[in-house]
């Protein structure tokens, strides 16, 4: 089955700097890679996703890149702000029918220092 | 639109006691999931329902865990008897029919077993 590894487990950056979180997956059939943000005591919420027919996707200060050959994908946050502090989870699944088997990474706790 | 609603939010029980969690998914979401999230880890699927049918319960520890979704809407997850290792956040989630890739989480039920 699919296995998703995520690193680093903790990341501390200064406000305004960039943050990068990396994930690798094992199942070459996976083709959908969502990222979730979970603030303390809150529900995980989808913030961005990417499908394997594209290599990069951007939404304001957030971007995701995908390297299908190497089976890794990354989340990039630019101009970080204190409100970006949260736990970020990557995940992998098979679109469109395999979302039910979404496998999550262990999470990265991001601290943005003001 | 109302999100996935869970209760209770927090529960502290002694080991060997029973506990139950309730979930009301987003209206129209036929697919309902129960995940367990251990501290510092990503969500792990326990059981998935399509309407009232449990279609994937392979990760549910059936000796002490049970779940039901009698009318295909609300669901309950029960643990009896609870063990210390069951301390975790129990997340309910739902998704639209045929779109299992977009998972909407509830805020979770935090269980502490002492």
Image (tube, rainbow, N blue to C red):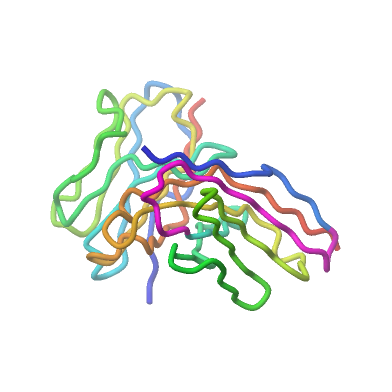
Q: Nearer the viewer, residue B8 or B100?
A: B100
Q: Which residues are magenta?
A: A14-33
> Left or right: where does residue B79 sit relative to residue A42?
left
Which residue occupies the foreground of this view, A37 or B39?
A: A37
- Measured as percent of width and height from the top left, residue A5 is found at 55, 41
Question: In the shown orientation, is residue B77 left or right of residue A50?
Answer: left
Q: Is residue B114 above or below residue B88?
A: above
Q: Quadrant of the N terminus of chain B?
A: bottom left
Q: How many marks?
A: 0
The picture places residue B52, in percent across and down from the top left corner, at 14, 52
Question: Quarter-wise, where is residue B67 in the image?
Answer: top left
Specify the farthest residue to the front: A69
Quadrant of residue B51 within the rendered picture: bottom left
Is B55 situated above or below B23?
above
Residue A62 painted magenta: no
Query: Which residue is at a point 71% across and 53% down the rendered structure image?
Result: A110
The answer to whether residue B114 is above or below residue A51 is above
Identified at 76% across, 68% down, the residue is: A81
Location of residue B81 by image quarter = top left
- At x 23% / y 42%, what residue is drawn? B56
Q: Would you place residue B79 above or below residue A85 in this image?
A: above
Q: Is residue A71 left or right of residue B103?
A: right
Q: Is residue A108 left or right of residue A89?
A: right
Q: Position of residue A103 (x, y in %)?
A: 42, 46
Q: Residue at x 56, y 55 (%)?
A: A73
Q: Nearer the viewer, residue B46 or B72?
A: B46
Location of residue A25 in the rendering, given as x and y in whole percent from the top left corner:
49, 45
């Amino acid at each position: 089955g699919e296995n998703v590894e995520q690193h680093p487990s903790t990341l501390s950056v200064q406000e305004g700097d960039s943050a990068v979180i990396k994930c690798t997956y094992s199942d070459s059939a996976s083709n959908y890679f969502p990222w979730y943000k979970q603030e303390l005591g809150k529900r995980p919420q989808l913030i961005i996703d990417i499908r394997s027919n594209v290599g990069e996707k951007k939404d304001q200060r957030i971007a995701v890149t995908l390297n299908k050959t190497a089976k890794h994908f990354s989340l990039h946050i630019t101009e970080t702000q204190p409100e970006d502090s949260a736990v970020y989870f990557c995940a992998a699944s098979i679109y469109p029918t395999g979302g039910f088997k979404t496998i999550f990474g262990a999470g990265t706790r991001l601290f943005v220092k003001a | 639109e109302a999100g996935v609603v869970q209760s209770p939010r927090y529960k502290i029980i002694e080991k060997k006691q029973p506990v139950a969690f309730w979930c009301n998914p987003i209206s129209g979401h036929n697919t309902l999931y129960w995940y367990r999230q251990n501290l510092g880890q990503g969500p792990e699927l326990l059981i998935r329902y399509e309407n009232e049918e449990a279609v994937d319960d392979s990760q549910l520890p059936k000796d002490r865990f049970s779940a039901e979704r009698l009318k295909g809407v609300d669901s309950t997850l029960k643990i009896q008897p609870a063990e210390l290792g069951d301390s975790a956040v129990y997340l309910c989630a739902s998704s639209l029919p045929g779109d299992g890739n977009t998972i909407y989480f509830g805020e979770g039920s935090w269980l502490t077993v002492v």
